[in-house]
Amino acid sequence: MTSAEPLPILCYPDPRLHTVARPVAAVDARIRDLADRMFATMYEANGIGLAATQVDVHERLIVIDVSEERDQPQVLINPQIEWASEETRKGEEGCLSVPGIYDGVERSVAIRVRALDANGAERVIEAEGMLAVCIQHEMDHLMGKVFVEYLSLLKRNRIKSKLLKAQREAERG
Ligand code: NI
């Protein structure tokens, strides 16, 4: 897959997860290295998507692989949603920054996204199903939004205390 070094993942409610990412200015070696390390991070954590925000880099870059064989990596740089279906569906989501928490989020069932790939070439991606959900989830991260913010305040506060407690326990070792 990749021999790049994984990066630490920010954990909710880390305030850095609410940073709005700026556009990638140039798709160069630095960005390709970042994408490689993000893939290493995502595969190691068994995730299907990761936004640069989650590794504390606030530039518009996401990596995705929704394939079962974990052999279809996709890099989306400066992604823009061109179209989103009015039809929505509620599906269960999780997030590498919110470990152990899964809950329902309403998303468009199909989208069309324009983005640059790792070579700086423009691509238009028509996505539905899990890929569409994953792209919308990761693009939210770039806007500083974590999926638990779609849940009720009560649920979100419960998740916050649970994760803060787990983080404190982990620090104590
Ligand atoms: Ni996430």
Image (cartoon, helix red, strand yellow):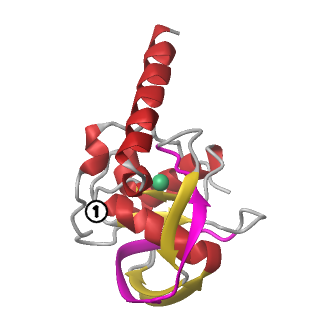
Q: Is residue 132 visible?
A: yes
Q: Main secondary structure of the magenta part?
A: strand
Q: Quadrant of residue 129?
A: bottom right
Residue sitting farthest toward the right: 69
Examine the structure image and report whether residue 95 is included in the region drawn in magenta: yes
| Residue 172 % position (x, y) | 47, 8
Mark 1 CB within 8 Å of ligand 1: no
Q: Quadrant of residue 32?
A: bottom left
Q: Nearer the viewer, residue 33 or 106?
A: 106
Query: Which residue is depicted at the point 71% across and 67% down?
Result: 71
Query: Which residue is depicted at the point 56% across and 69% down?
Result: 90
In the rendered structure, which amino acid carries the disc numbered 1? Met
Q: Is residue 69 left or right of residue 100?
A: right
Q: Is residue 29 visible?
A: no
Query: Which residue is depicted at the point 32% across and 36% down?
Result: 14
Q: Quadrant of the N terminus?
A: bottom right
| Residue 38 % position (x, y) | 49, 53
Q: Is residue 15 left or right of residue 109?
A: left
Examine the structure image and report whether residue 109 is included in the region drawn in magenta: no
- For the record, the magenta segment spans 72-97
The kind of secondary structure element at disc 1 is: loop
Image height of 14 relative to 43, above or below? above
| Residue 145 % position (x, y) | 33, 57
Q: Which residue is mark 1?
A: 143
Badge 1 crowding class, 10 Å Cα cut-off, few under 14, some 14 to 19, many 20 or more, is: some
Give the number of callouts: 1
Query: Which residue is depicted at the point 52% across and 50% down?
Result: 95
Q: Nearer the viewer, residue 102 or 96?
A: 102
Q: Is residue 21 left or right of residue 167?
A: left
Image height of 135 relative to 93, above or below? below
| Residue 126 % position (x, y) | 53, 90
